Image (cartoon, rainbow, N blue to C red):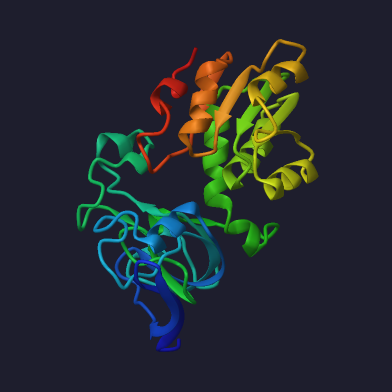
Amino acid sequence: MPATMQALVILEPNKFEIQEVSVPTAGPNEVLARVRAVSICGTDAHLIRGDYPGFWPPSFPFIPGHEWAGEIAALGPGSELYGWKVGDRVAGTSHDACGVCQKCVEGRYNLCENYGRPGLHKQYGHSVQGADATYVVQGVKTIFPLPDGLSFDEGAVIDPASIALHVANRGNIAPGDTVAITGAGAIGLLGGDAARIRGAARVILIERNPGRLAKATAMGFETVDSSAGDPIATVREMTGGFGVDVVLECAGSGHGAVGTRHAPPRRSLCRGWDPDPGRGDRDAAARPR
């Protein structure tokens, strides 16, 4: 095992560089993994800009990154009891929650009631060092076996894919539904795939970015350019005046949520998080009609 590794280090807001840093050591019930692929989350851009000072991250310098895949390089004490072995292919997620509060027991560990409390909760790449490095240390609760049929690149998007599937499940998409998705970023596109998995007959992606629209089209989705006119009127025209059964708000902006409010479908679900709480009424959009 080398003593040092390369890592992306944020020195201060809007200033980062590749540095040679010490390889971390796995503690009890942790593993050291060799990172083979890492994806970039929208949160990473916020961290680099310093949008959440003192919270994400608590301080600088800081190594971001929380959507990754790789292989176990070393086991911390006790991690072998969970069946992990050196060489196992794994994908990681960010929340290392307490596991005992009501939310954790319900399986909603992303809402852990002990969030941020030292010794009880960690969020890799947010409150503790992350995976934008050659190696990363994570707890056994935050890694999952990566099947041989999935590449490391695919494994690095399992975390956002799980979020997209959760959104589709919460939307109760039924076979034959027509689904509209606002935002054709990673979550929106993955949400479109999840809608198809649940049996949606039509999936319409609403977006204004030309590159994202092109990607959505290439993936076989119907698209609406929201910059070309009233997207609500366009969707109504596309559906013969019936509208859609389900709307998934994946743009992360108040504008997308307002759209679901003014064109209420049978069910709507808001996944996005706008860092500016003054734009749009996301709570209203998230309530089922």
Q: Toward the viewer: 164 or 233?
A: 233
Place of residue 173 in the rendered image (x, y in percent of width and height, measured from the top left)? 62, 23
Who's the residue at 52% across and 50% down the image?
A: 159
Place of residue 193 in the rendered image (x, y in percent of width and height, measured from the top left)? 68, 38
Relative to 1, is 164 on the left or the right?
A: right
Furthest residue to the left?
Answer: 118
| Total numbered labels placed on residues in the image | 0
Who's the residue at 71% across and 22% down the image?
A: 234
Q: Toward the viewer: 80 or 158?
A: 158
Q: Toward the viewer: 101 or 114?
A: 114
Relative to 92, is 196 on the left or the right?
A: right
Who's the residue at 73% across and 42% down the image?
A: 216
Furthest residue to the bottom?
Answer: 3
Q: Toward the viewer: 177 or 48?
A: 48
* Quadrant in the picture for the N terminus: bottom left
Q: Tell me the quarter of the picture where residue 23 sits.
A: bottom left
Place of residue 162 in the rendered image (x, y in percent of width and height, measured from the top left)? 54, 43
Q: Is residue 125 visible?
A: no
> Does 201 appear above or below 113?
above
Q: Tell me the quarter of the picture where residue 16 sits.
A: bottom left
Place of residue 250 in the rendered image (x, y in percent of width and height, measured from the top left)? 54, 37
Q: Is residue 288 visible?
A: yes
Who's the residue at 54% across and 24% down the image?
A: 259
